[in-house]
Image: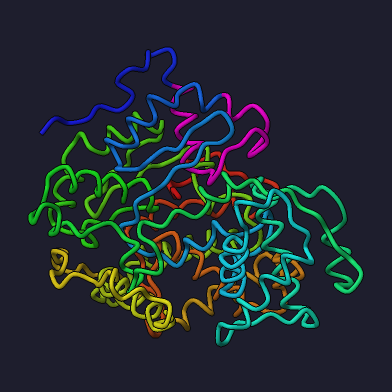
């Protein structure tokens, strides 16, 4: 099998510009003339042909690029709770289930024959569809329902799918009886925002949105499929632990070459340890979860907690218990089952229905172990931080809620694959030790962002 070479047609003097364009495509869900800012679309389109080939051969992704927009259509290998982070308004919280459902219903309500729509008309079309779904519904007199619609329309406006031409969304939110707004619809952008791997009406499981398991490629494990999946995991995850993936993928990632190809493609740096491999970004921008960095009290607390955990693990008088790390495959199966429990059965086209294959994916290697830090120790660590730096330094939102701040920090670290929550505490994952010396930089928020390497959390 021919091994694809990243940026094969790019001159050495242009490699930096090419890598910057690649990073833009990977970190921005949609690039237009104004998003993320003017000038970016032209910079990316310069490399459209080279990137289209590299994304297809290296990762199995499809790049949609024309003079108005650039959109990367990914192939998913696994579902991840953090994927909801992409559905958030600038500076806002990730979409909850209601907002996600409203977004799908709003997009479905746009008809190609219409180039504009008033908010009042949109609500009239949207409301029956929402009310037909048990547990969802839409009531304009319920402020939480209206707030969800406001967030959804704002999300679409930010991406250019809608353009406000008259009226005010805020006026409608204050008084839906008298306020209204008129939007122009960009159907091309709407179409690329929602491109599932299979029609959702044909799915009996959320697993149908994922790439085919390795064992089902041409009836066997295909080398190209293995290599592409390995590259996708390395690109999309903060860190790839060998114990979490199939032996064939772990073997490829251990060898020199595959990760280095991605480094040339993205401009990131390969970091290898005995337990796994990651792509590190010294600039701290190739991520949807910057760490360490200017992330507020939760980000800062997470870093300070890691430093205290490192001190605990390096203390010769302490011997934390080593616990077998739960398998990622089991976590993923549980997540798929939770999603599937809420899938409606009435709308599935049974004649075309996709069902999960009976053949299971190859199992990962033997489960590893990790040190356990008990919940009581974590609570003591947070209490020590509040005493050392003062409760007010953790902002008004958290200064009276150290336990809530601890929960938020642990969740954040888990999303970065640095700890693994388990009943009674957390398991410390190997990549966490790379942050053991960050206390001084995090102690004073004025010193952020850190001059030290800023992690490799890719999105």
Which quadrant holds residue 167? bottom right
Judged from this view, the residue extending furthest toward the front is 113
Q: Is residue 208 left or right of residue 444?
A: left
Give x and y (percent) for residue 435.
Answer: 45, 53
Q: Is residue 194 left or right of residue 125?
A: left
Q: How many marks?
A: 0
Q: Is residue 14 above or below residue 52?
A: above
Judged from this view, the residue extending furthest toward the right is 178
Q: How is the image coloured?
A: rainbow
Q: Is residue 13 above or below residue 345?
A: above
* Residue displayed at 40% across by 75% down: 421
Give x and y (percent) for residue 427.
Answer: 35, 72
**Magenta run includes residue 241:** no
**Magenta run includes residue 20:** yes
Magenta span of residues: 16-42
Give x and y (percent) for residue 315.
Answer: 37, 66
Q: Is residue 317 left or right of residue 226?
A: right
Q: Is residue 393 left or right of residue 93?
A: right
Q: In this orientation, which residue lies closer to the viewer: 57 or 362?
A: 57
Give x and y (percent) for residue 264.
Answer: 34, 28
* Residue displayed at 35% across by 60% down: 198
**Is there any visible trace of residue 318 in the rendered image?**
no
Q: In this orientation, which residue lies closer to the viewer: 170 or 128?
A: 128
Q: Quadrant of the N terminus?
A: top left
Judged from this view, the residue extending furthest toward the left is 220
* Residue displayed at 13% across by 56% down: 247
**Is there any visible trace of residue 41 in the rendered image?**
yes
Q: In this orientation, which residue lies closer to the viewer: 212 or 451?
A: 212
Q: In this orientation, which residue lies closer to the viewer: 55 or 389?
A: 55
Q: Is residue 114 above or below residue 34?
A: below
């Amino acid at each position: 099998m021919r091994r694809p070479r990243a940026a094969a047609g790019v001159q050495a003097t242009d490699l930096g510009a090419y890598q910057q364009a690649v990073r833009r495509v990977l970190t921005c869900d949609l690039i237009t003339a104004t998003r993320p800012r003017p000038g970016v679309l032209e910079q990316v389109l310069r490399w459209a042909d080279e990137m289209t080939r590299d994304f297809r051969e290296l990762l199995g992704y499809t790049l949609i690029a024309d003079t108005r927009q650039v959109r990367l259509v990914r192939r998913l290998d696994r579902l991840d709770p953090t994927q909801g982070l992409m559905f958030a308004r600038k500076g806002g919280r990730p979409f909850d289930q209601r907002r996600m459902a409203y977004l799908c219903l709003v997009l479905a309500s746009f008809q190609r024959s219409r180039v504009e729509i008033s908010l009042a008309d949109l609500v009239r079309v949207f409301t029956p569809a929402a009310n037909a779904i048990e547990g969802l519904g839409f009531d304009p007199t319920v402020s939480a329902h209206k707030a969800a619609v406001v967030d959804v329309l704002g999300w679409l406006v930010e991406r250019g799918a809608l353009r406000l031409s008259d009226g005010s969304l805020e006026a409608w939110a204050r008084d839906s009886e008298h306020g209204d707004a008129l939007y122009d619809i960009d159907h091309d952008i709407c179409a690329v925002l929602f491109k599932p791997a299979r029609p959702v009406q044909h799915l009996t499981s959320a697993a149908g949105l994922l790439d085919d398991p390795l064992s089902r490629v041409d009836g066997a494990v295909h080398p190209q499929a293995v290599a592409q999946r390995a590259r996708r995991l390395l690109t999309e995850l903060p860190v790839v632990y060998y114990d979490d993936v199939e032996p064939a993928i772990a073997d490829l990632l251990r060898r020199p070459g595959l990760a280095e190809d991605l480094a040339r493609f993205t401009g990131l740096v390969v970091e290898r340890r005995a337990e796994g491999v990651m792509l590190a970004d010294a600039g701290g921008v190739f991520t949807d979860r910057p760490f360490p960095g200017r992330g507020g009290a939760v980000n800062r607390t997470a870093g300070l907690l890691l430093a205290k955990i490192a001190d605990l693990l390096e203390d010769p008088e302490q011997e934390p218990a080593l616990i077998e790390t739960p398998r990622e495959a089991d976590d993923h199966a549980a997540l798929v089952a939770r999603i599937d429990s809420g899938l409606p059965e009435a709308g599935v086209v049974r004649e075309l229905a996709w069902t999960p294959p009976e053949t299971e994916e190859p199992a990962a290697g033997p489960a590893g172990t990790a040190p356990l830090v008990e919940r009581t120790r974590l609570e003591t660590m947070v209490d020590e931080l509040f005493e050392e730096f003062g409760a007010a330094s953790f902002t008004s939102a958290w200064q009276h809620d150290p336990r809530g701040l601890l929960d938020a920090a642990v969740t954040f670290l888990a999303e970065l694959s640095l700890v693994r929550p388990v009943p009674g505490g957390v398991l410390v994952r190997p990549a966490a030790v790379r942050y053991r010396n960050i206390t001084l930089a995090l102690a004073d928020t004025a010193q952020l962002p850190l001059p030290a390497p800023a992690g490799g959390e890719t999105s």
